[in-house]
Amino acid sequence: MTKRYVGIDLGGTNLKLGLVAADGSPIQRQTTPTQADRGPDHVIHRMAQAVRRLADAAGVRTSDVSAVGIGAPGPLDTRDGKVVFAPNLPGWRNIPVRDRLAQALDLPAVLENDANAAAYGEFRCGAGRGTNDMVMLTLGTGVGGGIILGGRLFRGKTDTGAELGHLVINRGGRRCGCGNRGCLEAYASATAVVARTREAIEAGEASALDPAADMTCKDVFDAAAAADPLAERIVDETADALAAGITSILHVLNPDMVVLTGGMMGAGDAFLSDIRRRVHETAFERAWAVCDIRWSTLGGDAGILGAALAAEAADRTGIPA
Amino acid sequence: MTKRYVGIDLGGTNLKLGLVAADGSPIQRQTTPTQADRGPDHVIHRMAQAVRRLADAAGVRTSDVSAVGIGAPGPLDTRDGKVVFAPNLPGWRNIPVRDRLAQALDLPAVLENDANAAAYGEFRCGAGRGTNDMVMLTLGTGVGGGIILGGRLFRGKTDTGAELGHLVINRGGRRCGCGNRGCLEAYASATAVVARTREAIEAGEASALDPAADMTCKDVFDAAAAADPLAERIVDETADALAAGITSILHVLNPDMVVLTGGMMGAGDAFLSDIRRRVHETAFERAWAVCDIRWSTLGGDAGILGAALAAEAADRTGIPA
């Protein structure tokens, strides 16, 4: 019988679930509100319920699912399967979500950092398919990172490896949400692009963009495409910050591929080409020559697929993905 | 019979050799001029000759040496055992030094980047003993890097991993020897400390240091200890640059230990404490809490020992160190 796995993306707003085959092909999907305000017990109960409903909708018995993978926001302790703390999940402090869900469903479960799960999904069946060493940057509210080395997820000693949004690229520069200054995230998250634009307008720089209106990262990129000088400067600086971060990544990890994903994918191929050009100028030729830089192909599905495939890898090999 | 290994540090000026036991205990050492100006054939001949003399001096037959490790300046192709190019070794372009030395001596040989060899030495029998994931920064003429992950040397896809001197910490900042701007090396090499001091004096900043005299990194640290304001500022900025680089390293690799070595070790423990304090302020607590930051204990011997122990590991396990 074909094996089947469930991937869960545990977000502050929604639980997204996918039932997938062992090769990552999607069979069934569902999204349901997390109801995070009702605390961890309730959320874990909802997760188990959602897995049962998902299997049901696909005409599969829950007991025929081979394993479940959970992608959760960090910090985590993946070895113990615990969420150490999660700013968007009230009450989640040292919650052994892996074992509690496994018990509720009577199925094996694994827990991965959500950015790592997304990177693993992209590695197994997205842009990174066929690579061996792959890095992913998720450019959204923050800048998340995931690292695959030798075909396996790299987590670091205490699951704090691959925090690539907190590479220091501008020592003493912009304040980051983490408290430090000059992190990649302070320049290159979709949120930071909007914040930097607003600040510049408020400081008196001329722009067609209205700082009082809702503004998205895409608005800034669109304004740059329409030759708005401020937006052009912001986009230029964003590409430069990303190139600096990617150059640093190439000089530490020398990978096959860097995949970019998240809200900033809307910036399009010209932006990607610009980043590539800059990395080519600044990185060692021997690192540049073997490293493709691409947009993700799975987009928002990477996290669910990656969580499911991390469960598949652990089920198949007996060791974590 | 106890196995014995030879480590060779192939420098532009000297060949340094060590005969060591399988646990890294030194048995015999030698240093002889490289005579690099006479080209690769001559140097490889001298390397073979030096290994024979070293064994002889220790009362060991060359054929009783189990394997030889070569630490060489890069870029290298360690898989093929070639020096791709070496600025300080005239005529070295794609030279298969590993196989040629192996043939000349009729012994197995391995080739490693010199900074990686030094890191491996420190990991096996220096400050990093007992760790699993260790990073070393060599603060000398440049800033070299070495990474141990899961007890093995990490090289990257084309031996360009661990080029930690070229982490971008000050985007658009000081020009680095590599051509890029803002690399860690442009601030934190011993050479950069002196260059930054000279530039500041030439720009009119007051200091007791004489820019016309020979000046070493140690002179700058000594002047800072004697409360010379310019030297204090330079030392402060150097600690800050190193802390930014180490913070980035913690956020990519989340290792057990970061070891610092090279000419800058003369800066002493107050400098190291200052770096630690800054990293504690800027790195994620979960990464900081498990990562010791230390001076190397092997100093200049790390490269020879590491090259020998890389040969030992390959001999023992059948795969590269």
Image (cartoon, coloured by chain):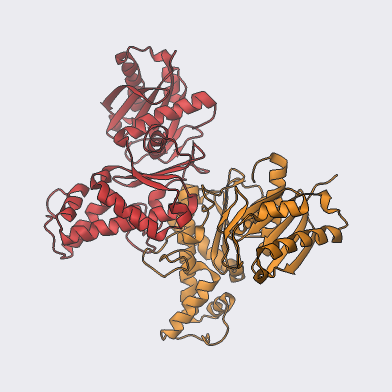
Chain colours: A red, B orange
Q: Would you say A204 lies left or right of A154 here? A: left
In the displayed orientation, state which residue is furthest to the right. Answer: B59
- The number of discs equals 0
Taking the image as drawn, is residue A190 in sight? yes
Residue A63 in percent (x, y) is at 42, 13
Locate residue A154, reporting x and y percent.
49, 41
Place residue B294 in its image quadrant. Answer: bottom right
Q: In front: B79, or B91?
A: B91
In this picture, residue A75 sits left or right of residue A215: right
Q: On screen, A196 above or below A155?
A: below
Identify the residue at horizontal 58%, vertical 83% (top origin): B214
Of B70 and A121, which appears nearest the observer? B70
Q: Is residue A53 left or right of residue B143?
A: left
The correct choice, above or below, for A79 with respect to B215 in the image is: above
Query: Residue at position x 86%, y 54% from top?
Result: B60
Residue A129, percent across and down? 41, 35
- Name the quadrant containing residue B14: bottom right
Tell me residue B143's x, y (percent): 54, 64
